[in-house]
Amino acid sequence: MRCVAVLVCLSVLLCALAPATHALGFRCTSQPEATCQALVGYKSPNTTTVKSIQSLFGVKHLHSLLAANNLSPTAPPTTTVQAQDTVIIPFTCRCSNGSGISYPGPVYTVQKDDGLYYIASIVFSYLLVYQDIQLVNHIENANLIKIGQQLRIPLPCSCDPVDGQRVVHYAHVVAEGSSVEEIAWKFGVPEQTLLDLNGLANAIDLMADTAFDVPLEACTSKISNGSLDASLLVPNGSYAFTANNCVQCSCDSVNNWTLQCQPSKIAALGDSTCPLMQCPGADNLTIGSTTVTNCGSETCSYAGYTSQNTILTTLDLKSTCPGTCSLLAFFKRLTFSPPICFERSLS
Ligand SMILES: *[C@@H]1O[C@H](CO)[C@@H](O)[C@H](O)[C@H]1NC(C)=O
Ligand SMILES: *[C@@H]1O[C@H](CO)[C@@H](O)[C@H](O)[C@H]1NC(C)=O
Ligand SMILES: *[C@@H]1O[C@H](CO)[C@@H](O)[C@H](O)[C@H]1NC(C)=O
Ligand SMILES: *[C@@H]1O[C@H](CO)[C@@H](O)[C@H](O)[C@H]1NC(C)=O
Ligand SMILES: *[C@@H]1O[C@H](CO)[C@@H](O)[C@H](O)[C@H]1NC(C)=O
Ligand SMILES: *[C@@H]1O[C@H](CO)[C@@H](O)[C@H](O)[C@H]1NC(C)=O
């Protein structure tokens, strides 16, 4: 009896691990129940505002939508978005059964004259197919939806590392006449990586008006692994808020894929207030600032935050005279005496 029970369990396990055969979402197999931040590129059919795009996708905070698009954090909700402009939408991705979809939202309310195909292809600009909506909402007959019905919209995403590197997955809708080569060039990703990730045998298999998984290289930081935002990843050419919105970190590949963080100019989340963001012992240097000393420079960097509303910092000393000066800078912090620099000749 015992043997049989064990065998049954084993086969159930094997079944659960078998790859999903339906096309919902992007492939996501690294961790069974991983969640992460992901992006889709949305093209509104109509000229609209950032506020209505925020509401269509259920983005909680307008500033995170602005940040993903590298727009000013103080841009008004009425900021215009032209028809067919691509707006980057940030959302939470959850992986399950080998594929990744947005979780928990967005939720779309059916309007007069809507059909599932229209909702998937026009309202959500081909980011998904109508069968995806049908599947997650358990709709038997795709032609039977009611005005006012609430539909969960499963945006495609993934949390998988690519070539051993943590990335941000971006769903790019393939334009008519585009090619894998063009997408590879535009996003700086090798063609073969794109083909493998999207399960295409050949570049000619690319189909227009489908969502294509593009792994974006992202900046990481000196954030320590004990920090609540240790997994923070910010794609090139955008910024993000962290530490209860107290800190703003931006990514530009020219800085060697290292996040550049500074105190944010927006209010802290909830009713918290932002703590001091200074490197101790460095003349009250604030994160993101550098002072020039006789021997080089001192830079105060963001290093994460803790549940005690504390912001962690690191102080980098860049010395132009090796050896002597970092030691001097250390004493300088203790004594506040002006540092003296000795040139060392190695002849
Ligand atoms: C995962 O697959 C199992 C079995 O096929 C199914 O019962 C379950 O609902 C699926 N979970 C999700 C989140 O789709
Ligand atoms: C676009 O605008 C037209 C006219 O203003 C409207 O009828 C249509 O529903 C809009 N489409 C979407 C997808 O919002
Ligand atoms: C976190 O950092 C500590 C020391 O800095 C290290 O011992 C530990 O292995 C790290 N943990 C992870 C999950 O990386
Ligand atoms: C990063 O973005 C900037 C513009 O924001 C662009 O000039 C640069 O080429 C990008 N770097 C990579 C590696 O894609
Ligand atoms: C860039 O980053 C890599 C790995 O993080 C490091 O090895 C390299 O020294 C850095 N280069 C510069 C110029 O800082
Ligand atoms: C650093 O800040 C403390 C308190 O905010 C202040 O008392 C002190 O004078 C400052 N030191 C310097 C060198 O500015």
Image (cartoon, rainbow, N blue to C red):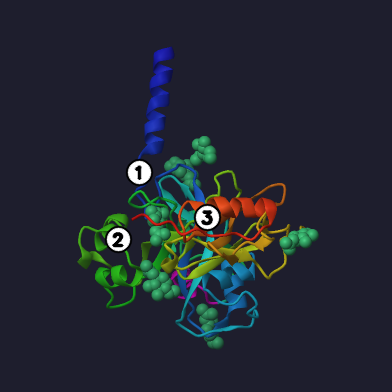
Q: Position of residue 8 (x, y in %)?
A: 40, 24
Whether residue 75 is visible, yes or no, is yes
Quadrant (top left, top right, bottom left, bottom right) of the C terminus: bottom left
Whether residue 111 is visible, yes or no, is no
Quadrant (top left, top right, bottom left, bottom right) of the N terminus: top left
For marks 3 and 1, give the CA distance: 58 Å
Q: Disc 3 residue type?
A: Cys
Q: Identify residue for label 2.
A: 194
Q: Disc 2 residue type?
A: Leu
Magenta stretch prevailing secondary structure: helix
For the magenta stretch, what is the residue range? 113-124
Badge 2 element = helix
Q: Earlier in the sequence, mark 3 or mark 2?
A: 2
Disc assigned to residue 325: 3
Q: Residue furthest top?
A: 1
Q: Earlier in the sequence, mark 3 or mark 1?
A: 1
Q: Position of residue 124 (x, y in %)?
A: 48, 71
Q: Picture quarter containing residue 339?
A: bottom right
Q: Position of residue 75 (x, y in %)?
A: 63, 79
Q: Closer to the camera, 317 or 209? A: 317
Disc assigned to residue 19: 1
Q: Is residue 59 above or below residue 167?
A: below
Q: Is residue 122 above or below residue 39?
A: below
